[in-house]
Image (spheres, grey):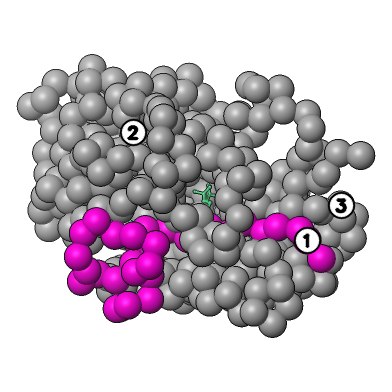
Amino acid sequence: MNKTILVTGGSGLIGNGIQSFVNKNNINKYNFIFLSSKDCDLRNQNDTRKIFLKHKPDYVIHLAAKVGGLFANMNYPVEFYRDNVLMNDVVMELCHEFKVEKLISCLSTCVFPDKISYPIDETMIHIGPPHSSNAAYSYAKRMIDIMNQSYNKEYGCNFTSVIPTNIYGPNDNFNLENGHVLPALIHKAYISKRDNTDFIIFGSGKPLRQFIFNKDLGELFLYVLENYDSIEPIILSVDEEDEVSIEDIAYLIAEAFDIDKSKIKFDKSKSDGQFKKTASNKKLRTLLPEYKFTKLKDGIFETCNWFKNNYENVKKIAKKLYVENGQYVVPRSKDEWVYDVLVKDNGTNICTVGFTKTQTEGALFFNNFEDINKYYDDQDSIKRIAKEYALSHGVPW
Ligand code: NAP
Ligand code: GDP
């Protein structure tokens, strides 16, 4: 009988990379189960146990996480810490309970100490504090390594972790405010081309990053599952010489959208975050010396084309917002909310309109992604609907 691989976060960026690799290469020796948050909330142990009981996984690839770019990490540190610690705790304990043969979890290069010698390698995770901009996420992620070691020491579990650098590709979260740099810039470039406006890059453009294509990662995850037998983490990254600046990727994206260079502007009032986190892929290269990564330009062009072709249906444009009372909130400065108005249509709750102290701005708290997608990119509609509902609820606008 085929072994079952349960992939948590299977609907996300890496999950889609694995699905795409599996489909393209007709890999049918495993029974893959790709989970999304709709299958269960992994922060809830009882619900997650039902999933384990149903699928009885032999292997688990644990991708699910509260994930976001620099600015989301700076705005929501509590959610980035708690959601990740809770999910990791539940998944690991169930992998132990269900005697899963191998668990692969995901760290990230931003978990490494801020002040460190370069290139970073797998031995350096715990030797100093992470960068302050994403400390909450980093500490939550670092605990995965501690838990892997502990479960192995006490119960002999085969739990390991991989450390990807910045990832990009089709099916990413293209949210303008909460997304990682590459998807956020692709979305901005799309709007800049469409509206003939400036293409604004946050920060100086000087920080350096190593980007890995999600489809390459899909392949490497399966490689690690089948061939990597250590509980110590392994960095999954392109080579050091493939590190590029944010400015470099902005120019590539502009080229993909045929945006004139004069339109590219840098907003230096915004944070640069960590200047660099150059990672060594020596461990991976020892195992796979000949592996050919997708060239950055090819991967970026493919992702830009995917975004253009799927723009109307990109389901994740407004995802990964914070959730309040079960509702997805279009992000603004949430501290400013003074009250909100629930909007109903034929008895169905459609959205809540939130009002800021000045009441010059409104935003909608939607009950489902479809509604968000309909309005989020269209600020005029948001304002119009907010105003309509404000006035109909006797709220001055
Ligand atoms: P992603 O696209 O944001 O997807 C996150 C996945 O987690 C989605 O499938 C989501 O389900 C699921 N999820 C979130 N909260 C959940 C919950 N409470 N219960 C159940 N499922 C939940 O993430 P990704 O970029 O593929 O990242 C995968 C892993 O790689 C993460 O551990 C991340 O920390 C790590 N990583 C990412 C990057 C990067 O650049 N993206 C870099 C380094 C490491 P829905 O689709 O239903 O929301
Ligand atoms: P990080 O790699 O973990 O720091 O996270 P990101 O993927 O969010 O990349 C952050 C870097 O990209 C910082 O240097 C930002 O200043 C820069 N950047 C430029 N424009 C944007 C943008 O629109 N969104 C994001 N998230 N970062 C941007």
> Which quadrant of the rendered structure holds the C terminus?
bottom left
Residue in view at x 53 percent, y 40 percent: 220
- What secondary structure is found at the residue carrying circle 1? loop
| Label 2 to label 3: alpha-carbon separation | 37 Å
Q: Which residue is mark 3?
A: 55
* Residue 328 versus residue 195 in the image, above or below: below
Q: Answer yes or no: do the residues labelled 2 and 1 have beta carbons within 8 Å?
A: no
Residue 130 sits above or below residue 188 on the image? below
Q: Tell me the kind of residue under disc 2.
A: Ile
Q: Identify the element where label 2 is drawn.
A: helix
Residues rendered magenta in the picture: 99-128
Main secondary structure found in the magenta portion: loop
Residue 19 location, x and y as percent?
Answer: 64, 34
Given the image, on which type of amino acid does mark 1 rest? Val
Q: Is mark 2 within 8 Å of ligand 2?
A: no
Do the CB atoms of the residues marked 2 and 3 lie less than 8 Å apart?
A: no
Q: Is residue 39 magenta?
A: no
Height in image: 345 above or below 321?
above
What number is the disc on residue 100?
A: 1
Q: Is residue 114 depicted above or below 165 in this figure? A: below
Mark 2, residue position: 186
